[in-house]
Amino acid sequence: MWKTFQHGANLYMIKVVQDTNLRLVLTDFQNIWVQEISKDDLLLQFQEANPLFDVKVDEIVTEVTEAINSISDLTDIEISEADEGLKLLLNSIKSEYKIKFKFNFHKSSSETFLKEITVPLIQTVKHLEERQNMLMNLLQKKDRELEEYKLEKGVISRDDLITEKFDEEKLNSIDDKSMMGVFGHNETFWNSFVSQHGNIEATIEENFSPSVKLLMDVHEVEDVMLPTTKDRKTLDFNLLPAKSKKIYELTYRRFMDYRRENKISSFSENELLTYFIHSSKKYKSSSLWSIYSMLKTTLSEKFNLNIGEYTQLRAFLKRQADGYKPKKTKVFKKEQVRKFLLEAPDYKYLSTKVVLIFGIAGACSCDDLLNLKTGHVEDVGSKILVNLPATVSKKSRFFVISEHLNIVRKYTSNRPVHCKSDRFFFSYWHGKPRAQVIGVHRMGSMPREIATYLKLPNPKEYTGHCFRNTSILFAKDSEKIDSKEYTGNCFRDTSILFAKVSERIAKERDPLADSLDFKVEIKEHFC
């Protein structure tokens, strides 16, 4: 291995190679000098410089090697150049004794400089480029793993583990004088160089897992399958809905990871069909259609590709739906809602009751209730006004609660003073309010909690969509609604619900009054 040292203002590199003879190579980066000496001659040369030392051949080889490898630590170095040679004198201290090492180098040719200096430097730069590309791909994959973790399991709790997203541009912003990215850019040049001078045998692959080595193998495929645009390195989904953007990105990245792992370089219909056949082993028909829809949008935006024209793929997805019966949430009946509100103990179910009142009164989804803030609810004495912020409908809507105000007021009056969040729904458990707000998972489990209290069969089938669909069902029972508008437990267009309720308000009729004694008004209805 080369060792560097300085003598005066000059910089040098030196290395020693052990074989039958000992070969020493010295360079000042402009010239190169070589000394090839047998071990016996080396011993004689050492004894002439150090007559008081009695050493053997193997010992002197070890001493010379150690002296060369530690040359940067030596302070007593003498160099003298002649026309065709160079003399190097090293003075080393060992066991309080001064040892001299004398070397007589002869100046070598430019071919030696090419072989010993230029070629290894080019090979090293190319090797570093390959390692950098591998590590950049690995970092990008780790970023995708972290994003998927955050989407599926939440945020990282420890601040010291949070890192910034890897930015490839910062790593590639190097000075024009650098040789990085030069030799691997021209494949024809590099193949000719390797055929003439060989290449460095990289051993790093043996120390990494198969998935990491795969990233190294498919790096060139990555360049083929991504377009040469400014947004090549960062995905910019401007056309995606803000609420679902992360899910779209996650679906897209899973698809691209599958392509990388299987070394796929095209977006042909056969490749897409293979991916969906693979996915059908894990997902049901409804999920496959969701994946198809999200990939259709992201691939269209990113690559201007319309997979909607892939007829065989659509035919496969339709066949997957044969015999598939989608699961729908169960809904509550009027008497079941009344029984829970009147009989369930407040000390345990107060927050659940209030969520039920708001959920059915405003036909609210879990997201609607989750985004409700204290400023959106106003108690004006005879009624409670609720201005629901935009979520699913993308526009806000308004409704009024005129009955069961005692339950709502009991809940709001117990709101903890030290609650930092302005979200309306906070935890209330065993008669004690908590400063912790109700999350989306807790909100979605409340229909199951109500069904369990009422001892209804299969309480797990009462999902987070239950409140909204129950409200829609009550509206259906109160009005004559065309069967084309309604299917199962859901309206084909949720705007129909708000239109029907608004129409009933005009006629001073209330579909929920029979069961809940609610006075529900919806002044604006959007979908």
Image (cartoon, grey):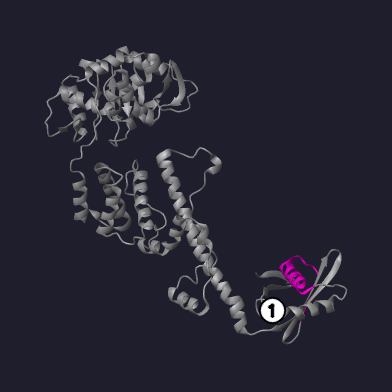
Q: Is residue 408 above or below residue 501?
A: above
Figure quadrant of residue 39: bottom right
The x, y position of residue 525, in whole percent, is: 23, 31
* Front residue of this view, candidates 337 and 328: 328
Residue lying at the far bottom of the rendered structure: 83
Q: Is residue 141 above or below residue 500?
A: below
The x, y position of residue 65, in whole percent, is: 72, 70
Name the secondary structure under disc 1: loop
Residue pictured at 62% horizontal, 82% vertical? 112
Q: Is residue 327 visible?
A: yes
Is 1 on the left or on the right of 406, as rendered? Answer: right
Q: Quadrant of the N terminus?
A: bottom right
Stretch of the chain drawn in magenta: 56-80
Residue ID for mark 1: 21
Residue pictured at 25% horizontal, 17% vertical? 336
* Front residue of this view, candidates 524 and 516: 516
* Front residue of this view, candidates 219 and 483: 219
Q: Quadrant of the C terminus?
A: top left
The x, y position of residue 371, in whole percent, is: 37, 31
Q: Amino acid at mark 1?
A: Asn
* Front residue of this view, candidates 440 and 220: 220
